[in-house]
């Protein structure tokens, strides 16, 4: 029970820290004259991945590679199956394929790149450099294509910034929000890591299983809140775009930074099962969006059902 309490407290701190950091950073960006496009693309699109970033770095530095990698892979799976499935049940997510073509294809490409780089059963610093260079290339491509008006997804990233309201108004409150957010993320990651390791030991399952499920869902709560709010407001492109941006940053940014700090061996079950589920869910989402230009309630239900099957298999067939 103590370990469960640690996990619950850690998730609450990470969620609060992520919210405070996003709001403080977004307010600072507006105050400094950053464009709504850049604010939505970088701060909201990638800021929601701050809990995953801090947890994976903490796990890597503490030599818990299964949690560091499992957190990223599991978050990408839950983002699509759980969060988008839930959003589609709230309201069908109609979307223009052209708006999300670049980001959707990039998610699939990043998933394939992960499969290639973990072929040697580990992520080395050289692999980390490739991830980070790929992320840099994506950001440059995204910003310049949208700034020049060549990509209609520019409006999507502007809208992402508008989904976050109640921003701090004064410089003092902005600084306090950013500092508080960082502190909560650091403390929350340590508490969550302690609880997750304890639960794995208590139930006799691998740390990879806990990282892929419990930790992954806990660190994905900022994405959940932004996407659910967007779904209730009928902003389908924002709900889907937020998830795609987060998945890109999870693979290229978080794994890149984590493996750069500490080379990460990859658990056998991730090689045999989870990486293929991650690629399959990315392809499935792309298929749903391109065939019907929308994510229907039926497809959302199928995604949620798929996540239930995935979690069930994680704790039975692939529990060690």
Image (cartoon, grey):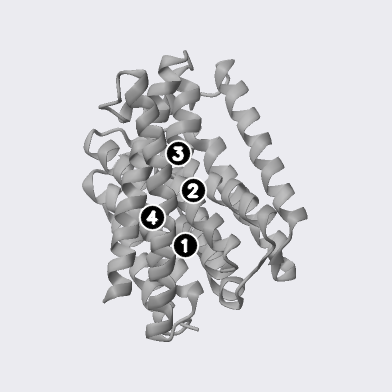
Q: Are marks 2 and 3 in contact (CB under 8 Å)?
A: no
Front of the two marks 4 and 2: 4
Q: Is residue 16 left or right of residue 72?
A: left
State which tag comes first along the sequence, 2 or 3.
3
Q: Residues within 10 Å of mark 1 (few under 14, many from 20)?
A: many
Residue tagged 3: 47
Residue tagged 2: 286
User: In the rendered image, is residue 291 in sight?
Assistant: no
- Above/below status of 260 relative to 152: below
Q: Which label is found at residue 188?
A: 4
Identify the residue at image location x=71%, y=41%.
Answer: 133
Could you tell me how far apart the alpha carbons at marks 4 and 3 are, in whole angstroms?
16 Å
State which tag comes first along the sequence, 1 or 2.
1
SS for dot 2? helix
User: x, y (%) of residue 186?
Assistant: 44, 51
State which tag comes first along the sequence, 4 or 2.
4
């Amino acid at each position: 029970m103590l370990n469960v309490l640690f996990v619950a407290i850690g998730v609450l701190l990470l969620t609060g820290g992520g919210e405070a950091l996003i709001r403080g950073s977004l307010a600072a960006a507006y105050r400094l004259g950053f464009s709504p496009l850049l604010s939505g693309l970088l701060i909201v699109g990638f800021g929601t991945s701050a809990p995953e970033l801090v947890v994976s770095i903490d796990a890597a530095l503490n030599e818990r590679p299964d949690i560091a990698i499992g957190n990223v892979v599991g978050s990408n799976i839950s983002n699509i199956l759980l969060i988008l499935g839930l959003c589609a049940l709230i309201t069908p997510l109609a979307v223009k394929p052209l708006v999300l073509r670049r980001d959707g294809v990039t998610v699939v490409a990043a998933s394939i790149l992960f499969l290639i780089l973990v072929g040697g059963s580990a992520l080395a610093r050289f692999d980390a450099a490739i991830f980070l260079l790929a992320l840099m290339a994506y950001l440059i491509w995204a910003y310049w294509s949208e700034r020049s008006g060549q990509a209609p997804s520019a409006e999507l990233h502007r809208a992402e910034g508008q989904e976050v309201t109640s921003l701090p108004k004064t410089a003092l409150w902005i600084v306090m929000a950013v500092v508080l957010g960082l502190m909560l993320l650091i403390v929350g990651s340590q508490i969550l890591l302690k609880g997750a390791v304890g639960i794995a030991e208590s139930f006799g399952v691998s740390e990879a299983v806990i990282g892929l499920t419990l930790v992954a869902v806990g660190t994905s709560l900022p994405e959940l809140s932004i996407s659910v709010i967007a779904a209730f407001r009928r902003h389908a492109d924002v709900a889907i775009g937020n998830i795609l941006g987060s998945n890109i940053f999870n693979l290229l940014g978080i794994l890149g930074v984590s493996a750069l700090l500490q080379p990460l061996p990859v658990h056998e079950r991730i090689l045999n099962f989870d990486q293929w589920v991650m690629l399959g869910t990315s392809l499935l989402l792309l298929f749903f969006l391109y065939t019907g230009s929308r994510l229907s309630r039926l497809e959302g239900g199928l995604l949620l059902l798929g996540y239930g099957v995935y979690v069930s298999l994680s704790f039975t067939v692939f529990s060690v």
